[in-house]
């Protein structure tokens, strides 16, 4: 995997670049739609590519391991063949999902023992196993297995957890280095910077991951309950240490304002379930502000969902979409999800263009205010 | 509305024709996807037209009246503008839906009083009101308000009910004749032939509706629990009476075999929720037979859903679709619904071609056997 910086802007840490993978190029900064179980909820692979303009999508190791399972994915020839998405895929390592399981998981030096949310069966994720699974999934970008701490963890827990994550990282790279890609295209492994909300831990973690000279680095364990300002501060602390010539991936972030603020702080890649999850609930993000389409005020508004919208679904009317969402019609969730994803991709595409033109900072300031408006 | 017969076949009552409406032509025999609340579940208007090849869709007066309501549809400029489907629309009159409400409806000479399934509010559907609502919806084809009797109704009930339906038909035409289309294109009113499973009532009903010299005629109250052979027999009795030069619409029918058997008996138009409803549950209709995609046997079958399939969704693999359906992923329901609708439209398109070529009967005999196979 290669990363080429193509533009930076003075007065901002924002960068534009190009990542080259075995499944094509990714123009950064980029937002990555989340396909938890191999499908971006409600969206055909064709529309992801042609309508939304997605360049890379996520899969989740935890979910894909449980269902359909590694043997099915291997028989398919990897996730790309399985789900018909032929662009780059990044897989989350499962650390965050296991963390979310709460009472039904136990973390030891060896790894994380957990119960399936589907059938209660017991499983162990170790750093080695998680690398092996992602080899089998065929992710272009494999994430290291880490422990994600809760937003309110105390310093001592956060420090010990980080040390565990660091020992696991050694094991991830050892396993990665002694195994090969299975489907004839290259795979790469991104370490994850943890350290909770403690700047010294975050800094130490960033310095540690650099020693692996990876193709890219992720910032994990944020957007899990801490204030936004703390998330931005941690991102700044980490990005100050991470090398300039490698992409930086801020995991699980966020709303459109978070996206722009993170890009401004030197983040190149982001993912979040928000565009699809909030879409299914009737929340639309637009360049004019936020629409709660369930609101009575849209019941008789027959104007397009988004006059400036990038997707074909934006030609449907607000009144129609409201009717579908209120009526629990599946098509409502589809339209809102597709609109939101197309908007997110428009947002990062435009951010990239503004960085290239050298006026990202001023555009961002205006856009951030606009994005907060409730229409 | 005009109907032109373009082909018939000796040895069969099957016909090919063209219906001309204010929203374009319909090549018959045709299957009409059901958009109960204005949306064909899970399917974008664009895909209905371009991928599935739908030529006319259904809306339901009962559902659209309750939600979004007539005032919203009028403000939109009719259902076509509201749901972005610019082809012909036929609206069911609500008679069948009200019949399905069971205990929460009461039928009198005036009409049907019922409670909304949404909020329990009381409403009265009269023949006049139902015509007015369909005027407001803007259906190209308006259906008469009728009483649909249960499959096991005794002769006396069926006879009295038919007489009520016939009196209501007078009132429907009276209201239709003294009102105008609202959106600048023509609308037409189809009577519905009732009479339960009693040949003499069906015959009498068919003779009665002819007196209105309508643009087309529907056969209602079938596929509500009676044996298939009885349904076919009733269709034959009615079609023997209905004029040759008008389209015949068999309401709410059916599975692919029913479709072909009905076409063979002179039916020109059909609708059913089966392709979408069964699709959501994982049942696929194909030219090779029926697939229950939930079956374990498909878990590792990475061949396309349907090698001969007409839709882009048929390129997804069986294993992937099974995974989505088993995982309750929305995309699974979308893919299966779109496949099934595309298959139904392929089926009637091919039937039409075979009628035109004069070999429908032999093709049908083979196809009917194939369609029954469980793969």
Image: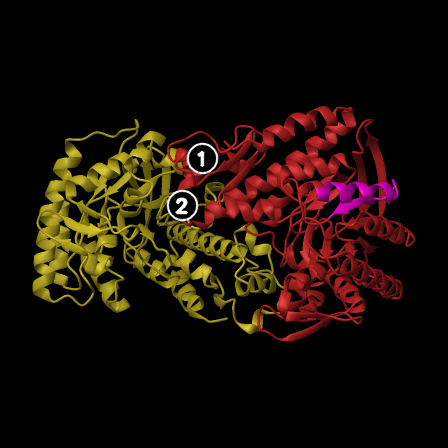
Chain colours: A red, B yellow
* Of residues B64 and B276, the one drawn nearer to the viewer in this rendering: B64
In the rendered image, residues at marks 1 and 2 fall on the same chain = yes
Q: Earlier in the sequence, mark 1 or mark 2?
A: 1
Where is residue A214 drawn, in percent x and y?
87, 52
**Residue drawn at 20 percent across, 65 percent down:** B151
Decide: few, some or many residues near mark 1? Use Cα within 10 Å; few <14, some 14-19, many ≥20.
many
Where is residue B164 drawn, in percent x and y?
9, 52
- The residue under label 1 is A318
* Residues rendered magenta in the picture: A230-250
Per the image, label 2 sits on a secondary structure element best described as helix
Residue B176 shown left or right of residue B225 in the figure: left
* Of residues B177 and B331, the one drawn nearer to the viewer in this rendering: B331
* Of residues B151 and A121, the one drawn nearer to the viewer in this rendering: A121
Residue A213 shown left or right of residue B75 in the figure: right
**Residue drawn at 88 percent across, 65 percent down:** A174
Decide: few, some or many residues near mark 2? Use Cα within 10 Å; few <14, some 14-19, many ≥20.
some
**Residue drawn at 59 percent across, 74 percent down:** A120
- The residue under label 2 is A326
Q: Is residue A174 magenta?
A: no
CA separation in Å, label 1 and label 2: 12 Å
Where is residue B36 drawn, in percent x and y?
35, 49
């Amino acid at each position: 995997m290669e990363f080429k910086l193509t533009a930076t802007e003075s007065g901002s840490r924002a960068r534009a670049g190009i990542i080259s993978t075995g499944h094509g190029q990714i123009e950064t900064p980029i937002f990555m739609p989340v396909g938890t179980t191999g499908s971006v909820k409600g969206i055909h692979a064709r529309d992801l590519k042609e309508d939304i303009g997605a360049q890379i999508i996520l899969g989740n190791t935890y979910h894909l391991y449980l269902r359909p399972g590694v043997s099915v994915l291997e028989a398919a020839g990897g996730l790309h063949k399985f789900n018909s998405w032929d662009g780059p895929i990044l897989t989350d390592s499962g650390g965050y999902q296991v963390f979310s399981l709460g009472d039904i998981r136990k973390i030891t030096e060896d790894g994380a023992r957990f119960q399936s949310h589907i059938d209660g069966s017991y499983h162990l994720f170790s750093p080695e196993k998680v690398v092996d699974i992602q080899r089998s999934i065929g992710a272009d970008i494999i994430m290291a297995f880490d422990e994600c701490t809760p937003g309110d963890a105390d310093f001592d827990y956060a420090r010990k957890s980080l040390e565990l994550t660091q020992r696991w990282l050694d094991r991830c790279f050892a396993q990665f280095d002694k195994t090969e890609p299975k489907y004839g295209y290259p795979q790469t492994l991104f370490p994850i910077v943890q350290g909770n909300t403690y700047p010294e831990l975050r800094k130490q973690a960033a310095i540690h991951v650099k020693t692996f000279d990876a193709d890219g680095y992720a910032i994990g364990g944020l957007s899990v309950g801490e204030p936004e300002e703390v998330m931005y501060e941690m991102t700044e602390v980490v990005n100050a240490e991470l090398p300039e010539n490698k992409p930086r991936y801020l995991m699980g972030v966020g709303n459109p304002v978070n996206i722009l603020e993170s890009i401004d702080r030197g983040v190149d890649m982001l993912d979040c379930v928000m565009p699809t999850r909030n879409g299914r609930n009737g929340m639309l993000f637009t360049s004019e502000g936020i629409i709660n389409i369930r609101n009575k005020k849209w019941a008789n508004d027959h104007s397009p969902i988004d006059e400036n919208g990038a997707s074909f679904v934006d030609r449907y009317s607000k009144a129609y979409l409201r009717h579908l969402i209120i009526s629990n019609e599946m098509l409502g969730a589809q339209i809102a999800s597709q609109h939101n994803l197309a908007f997110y991709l428009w947002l990062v595409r435009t951010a990239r263009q503004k960085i290239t033109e050298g006026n990202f900072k001023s555009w961002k300031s205006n856009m951030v205010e606009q994005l907060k408006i409730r229409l």
